[in-house]
Amino acid sequence: MKRAPAGGAGAARAREGRARTLPWLETTVTSLAAGGDGVAHAELAGERRAIFVPSTVPGDRVRIEVDIHRRPARGRLLELLSPGEARTTPACAWAGLCGGCDWMHISLAAQATAHAEQLRAALPSHWRQVDIPTMSPAGALGYRSRARLHILAKRGGRVVVGMHQAGTHDPVEPDACVVLDPALEEGRLALGPIFAGCHGRGEAKLALGTNRHPVVDVAWCGVIAPETFARLEQAVARGALAGAQIMLEDATRPAKVGDPTPWMSGADGLPLRLAAGGFSQACERANAALVAHVAEQVRPLRAERAVELYSGAGNLSVLVAPAVGELACVESSRELCDAARFNLSSRGLRARVVEADAATYEWGPATKLVVLDPPRTGARAVAERLAASKVPWVVYVSCDPQTLGRDLAIVQPTYELTSITAFEMFPQTSHVETVVALQRRRT
């Protein structure tokens, strides 16, 4: 069994030896930064500076080494002198080393509070006094129905399959991942032996496929051993995987074994087909609550014509389409457009799926509602066009408070905030999902 690296006094002394070239100090963490680090303050070279310290919580009294050449300064934890009230024992022995769950040392209640505070701080100043309710999933372990993994074939034939080690691009391989759906965890553990004998490294997207068996989409840089494809076929035959596809760096199309199509449970309780390697929400339970909430915002508007931007495979569309008169779903990925058409038609829903860049898509003057669910980079161009438009209503789904705040600042002179809700889509992490409803100001 693989074991997490040992900590304790010996490790602390080793860290102290390496830290002698950098200043160290004792301080108290007072808050959490948007990226997940704890924040402390201290006088450094005659200047009061913020110091970002990973793996800490507000109230922690810590001894840290400090890199003062970065802004903000960066601290590395040498010793926890006394814990803050929000600190809890991580459910995983690899927390802190594995970069997958950066807030597993923080209680769930404190995570939700910090998310709401960070979201509030990112809002335009006029809206920072609004109530921000938080919706939490039923559980915070075994919830992830998709994961991104990193595969590294080392010299000697050993293959490491896991998440990035915190602060590096090298994979760390936990003996168990407690946040993955159990079926995905079995799939993760199967990948090491399958890729034995390969050379190079790969990025793998793991999801649930037919009958909730795992599917994997791999982009590989290096050489794939011929035995790998035989092992994949055997894994599909015995039900360890539903399917797999591998894209080599010099190939024009992926090699497929079995059926690599990912599926998830849609918010309406019916299966939702996705695109191999495409985006989907990480937690099915929280996603169902989020989509239902979006539909609750849309339904009373009785919008005759609506546009959904960044519509993906139709995750929102399956509940938005029945709530509006006409719906245009705009998505740039052909594979996701195909999946959206399947999901809508299999439910008997009518909507027009448009393969186009959502950032530049021109909606018609009769459009009454725009729903958008952009990537983490946000939707600055869409926000600028909305601010100059006459669209009465907007529902914005965001996975990043900072880019959401930037985009809301653009539309704030034109729109009023009618509701904002946070969804704990990614428990144990510093990430949060948000739904914002806006109404055009009357002039």
Image (spheres, helix red, strand yellow):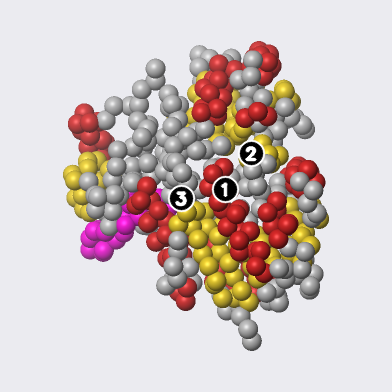
Amino acid at circle 2: Met
Magenta stretch holds residue 50: yes
Q: Position of residue 301 (x, y in %)?
A: 67, 69
* SS assignment at label 1: helix
Label 1 near label 2: C-beta < 8 Å? yes
Residue 302 vs residue 360, the one in the foreground: 302
The residue furthest bottom is: 443
Q: Residue at x 29, y 49 (%)?
A: 86
Q: Position of residue 391 (x, y in %)?
A: 70, 73
Q: Is residue 256 above or below residue 36?
A: above
Residue receiving disc 1 = 287
Magenta stretch holds residue 98: no
Q: Residue at x 58, y 67 (%)?
A: 437
**Can residue 165 be seen by looking at this rendering?**
no
Amino acid at circle 3: Ser
Q: Which residues are magenta?
A: 31-53
Residue receiving disc 2 = 264
